[in-house]
Image (cartoon, rainbow, N blue to C red):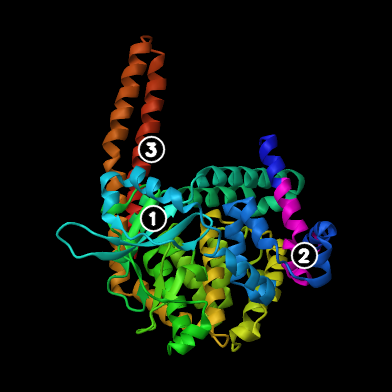
Amino acid sequence: MGLGSTFRFFRAGWVLAREGAFSVLPVESLPPMMKLGVGLARVVERPSVRRTGHVDRLNAALHKLGPSYVKFGQTLATRPDIVGPQAAADLAGLQDRMPPFDPNLVPGILVSALGPKAAQLTEISPPIAAASIAQVHQAKLRVPGAAPKTVAIKMLRPGVAERFHADTNALYAGARLAEIFAPASRRLKPTEVVKTLDHSMRIELDLRLEAAAISELAENIKNDTGFIIPQVQWDQVAQNVLTTTWVNGIPIRDHAALDAAGVDRKALASKLLQAFLRHAIRDGFFHADMHPGNLFADRVTGDVIAVDFGIMGRLSKRERRFLADILYGFITRDYRLVAQRHFDIGYVPQHQSVDDFTLAIRSIGEPLHGRTAADISMAKVLGQLFAITELFDMQTRPELVLLQKSMVLVEGVARSLDPDLDIWTVAEPVVGEWLRREEGPVGRLEDFGGHLTRMSEALGRAPVLIAEAELALAEHRARQARPAARPVETALFAVLLAAFVVLVLAAWRLLTTGF
């Protein structure tokens, strides 16, 4: 943990406190220690913030601190129910209205990245949108023998990789300080969380990987309706340049424009939430940066149009089942199922009581049923969740951090579109259909196929294990000429033979326990 990173972390804390970042938090819902921390941070707040409650300079401060902090601000901007409508409106400018980089750099960036094929991109517009990582231009793609095509060119900001690296080093420093001086934070695994975010950020800085993500998502949703994404133009893709077809739509945050075009905002909210759940639960691959700057509505069909696939989330089959069971448990008020799944996946330690945790889950779930989004205070719900995580010594699962962050984003956007949204009613068709399929013949056959594959892989390793056993015995015989070595050889062979038997039995167990 370098001194430079530690200094950068404390400087970020000072800037955020000075510009009123902590004033937007729902202090009344926080645990006592967090309340104390927020209170101390607000001591250095600018007098104008304390006097008016307006955080007018927070946008600029977050941008100055670096792209990681901008991402945090983008998430807060989707939750006026938590940070307040004024703060959310101020932070919304972080989504795609950041200052662009020098337009004179654009031609050189394209030539350096694409070589001669850069010449096929003509009529390049000024920046259409500028965010913390990149900015987007409209252009014409003119390929010999094909009709001109309107495209979107996304270019990374010069020097953004270095800024990200500095940000993550500072976050690592903060996480390690928390683990050293606040032992209670260790159950939240701050360093592992930062490591997960660091990995997603590094992927975001290679636009070739974003192009591949668009391609994979397109395959997953080819038979779906209600969700539209652009197509990749592979000949105009490089590490720092991504070219896709241009998609026309109304910004999803422009409610007046949506209403004027006759777009049904309630239906749009349902499409957004259901598409996200379908991608996460059915496919295990989802858009993990669905802030309003990345979402549009088709003015004709009312479908969701998504852009910017730099941050994608991926879930294993086990994690998808966890998510589906949790949602279905809340939908059906089966709080025992919700509680048990938290134990199964490792959120709650085994020494805790399932019955007591079921009671805690019921205390959260029951007040939410039959209530619209407008009637639910997420600040109070989050405060209750904070208390429960501490009471039951709940552990963070770093691999689910992106999912949790994305659910906060999507639910916030859907809320803004439809304040009367009933989340459970909208989620049930997607969750219920997937669970019924998993429990039906098709799901069972897929599980059986998975077991066969794992058994085949396990058995395939058996010859290697036998060969290693023979080699070990041969080497041992070469080193040991005395008869006294015979018992050792026998013991070694017995251990290796036992390992082989265990391997075969484990493979057989994988096959038989699927039914």
Q: Which residues are magenta?
A: 10-33
Q: Looking at the rendering, which quadrant does residue 486 occupy?
A: top left
Q: Secondary structure at mark 1?
A: helix
Q: Is residue 297 visible?
A: yes
Give the Cα separation between the discs numbered 1 and 2: 39 Å
Residue located at (61% from left, 60% from top): 72
Above or below residue 465? Residue 375 is: below
Residue 413: horizontal and vertical position, in percent? 53, 75
Q: Quadrant of the N terminus?
A: top right
Q: Looking at the rendering, which quadrant does residue 40 occupy?
A: bottom right
Q: Does the stretch in magenta take in 379? A: no
Give the Cα separation between the discs numbered 3 and 1: 43 Å
In the image, farthest residue toward the left: 145
- Of labels 3 and 1, the one closer to you: 1
Residue located at (64% from left, 57% from top): 62
What amino acid is at disc 2?
Answer: Pro
Viewer-proximal residue among 373 and 182: 373
What amino acid is at disc 3?
Answer: Ala
**Which callout, 2 or 3, points at the residue further toward the start of the chain?**
2
Viewer-proximal residue among 364 and 48: 48
**Which callout, 1 or 2, points at the residue further toward the start of the chain?**
2
Task: Decide: few, some or many residues near mark 1? Use Cα within 10 Å; few <14, some 14-19, many ≥20.
Answer: many
Above or below residue 509? Residue 148 is: below
Give the Cα separation between the discs numbered 2 and 3: 50 Å
In the image, farthest residue toward the top: 481
Q: Where does label 1 land, which residue?
A: 210
- For residue 31, the mark is 2
- Of labels 1 and 2, the one closer to you: 1
123 relative position to 388: left or right: left
Q: Where does label 3 land, which residue?
A: 499
